[in-house]
Amino acid sequence: MELIKLNKEVLIISKKISSFLNPTYIYIPIKNNKLLVRQNEKILKNQYLFKDNYEIMSPVSGIILGLTTKFCDDKKQKCLVIKNDFKEKRLTVSRKKAFTWTIANFLTSLEEHHLSFLLKKFRNLKRVKNIIINTVEDETYSESEILLFKENIDAILSTLDKLSLMYQSSINNIVICEIWKDIIEDCINTLGSYPNIKLALVNDYYLLGQEQFLLDYLKYDRKDTLYLTVTELMQIYNAVINNLVEDTKLVTISGNALVEGKVIRVKKYCSLEEIMNNNFKIDGNFQFWVNGLLKGKMATLEDIVITDQVTVINVMQEPELKTSNCFNCGKCVRICPVGINVAKCYKKNKTDKRCLNCGLCNYICPSFLNLKAKVLGEKE
């Protein structure tokens, strides 16, 4: 597949990270978890809420109000509602001694902090040839990862250095898109202390935010490479070095309906509606897209909750699009990264290949058809 550069609107996004850390309500998706708490019960920050899931803790102290339905992780689902008391009363987290970087200690720390996704990556790892830290994002107009990197360059380089020594990697690259010249310069000024770490500059191509496409682009063997995002590396740093339970995350909120977009640090599981009301001026009816215009889904403002999976919210003016029928131009077929015959699938709604949900077929379609929905078997 030949990677492409997307045509993007010129959007103004502040290069400073804002904060909104005092939401009135928190909405935590229940899924199939069994509750440890009851209505009207007072809870503490960092308190476990479910019997069978110790990765989810309350990001605030407050009181349990009950249940409601919200849009979380691409669908509507039941959520536990917590009213914030703004006191930040927390369960005490025992302090550790100075951390000694051994594989056994490292795995124990990941397990203690319930970082199961990272534990799965590292559990059977003894030695690795390459370590890649990716700052690139695919989500349209999102700048959360690169600004998180800018904010924590020293911590990221130090943690990567420790990992490289522990796993004896010979090539350690931080991947940055070449458009971020000021951040590249800041990083170069710090790299002198870490001779085993190099920058890998890449073009502004779509899908380089995904592991498989980035490693193919850099010509690295997946079997010999440990791939991490900036967010994952910061989770390692906070767990291992700071013994910190993370209760906030960065989200980019941008779009042509906003005068200026922001990368904003918010409490996990707060509502987008409360973020917008306290940090943005917006009038009229607009579309709200969760996780990008290509990969994401549209939802109503009142429903959207900021979970771990949410990286960007696009606030867009309603487009004036004229749709027509498919006239078999073949553009969607040629651009599909996994070789799906999208035009055929649009008519018959069937494919044997796994769709990546990249949205390139919708992006390229001259008839403005919702091809992606058909391929994924969703309603248009």
Image (cartoon, helix red, strand yellow):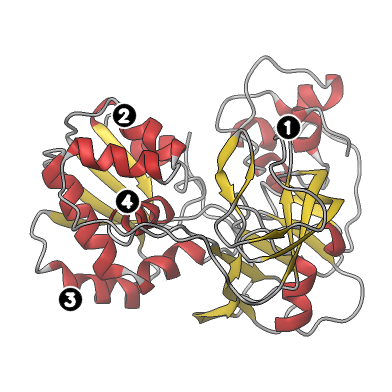
Does the image show residue 256?
Answer: no
Q: Is residue 264 left or right of residue 305?
A: left
In the rendered image, the vertical position of residue 185 relative to residue 33, given as above or below: below
Circle nearer the viewer, 2 or 3: 2
Pointer 2 or 1: first along the chain: 1
Q: Find disc 3 in the rendering and name its residue.
A: 189
| Label 1: how many Cα within 10 Å (few below 14, some 14–19, many 20+) | few
Q: Find disc 2 in the rendering and name its residue.
A: 123
Q: What kind of residue is marked 3? A: Asn
Q: What kind of residue is marked 1? A: Asn
Q: What kind of residue is marked 2? A: Arg
- Whether pointer 4 and pointer 1 mark residues with C-beta atoms closer than 8 Å, the reply is no
In the rendered image, the vertical position of residue 34 relative to residue 156, given as above or below: above
Circle nearer the viewer, 2 or 4: 2
Pointer 3 or 1: first along the chain: 1
Which labelled disc corresponds to residue 32? 1
Cα distance, mark 4 to mark 1? Answer: 33 Å
- Whether pointer 3 and pointer 1 mark residues with C-beta atoms closer than 8 Å, the reply is no
Q: Find disc 4 in the rendering and name its residue.
A: 133
Circle nearer the viewer, 2 or 1: 1
Q: Position of residue 130 (x, y in %)?
A: 21, 39
**What residue sits 78% from the left and 85% below the top?**
281
Pointer 4 or 1: first along the chain: 1
Q: Position of residue 38 (x, y in %)?
A: 78, 48
Q: Secondary structure at mark 2?
A: loop
Q: What kind of residue is marked 4? A: Ile
**What residue sits 91% from the left and 71% below the top?**
285
Cα distance, mark 3 to mark 4? Answer: 18 Å
Circle nearer the viewer, 4 or 1: 1
Q: Position of residue 139 (x, y in %)?
A: 58, 55
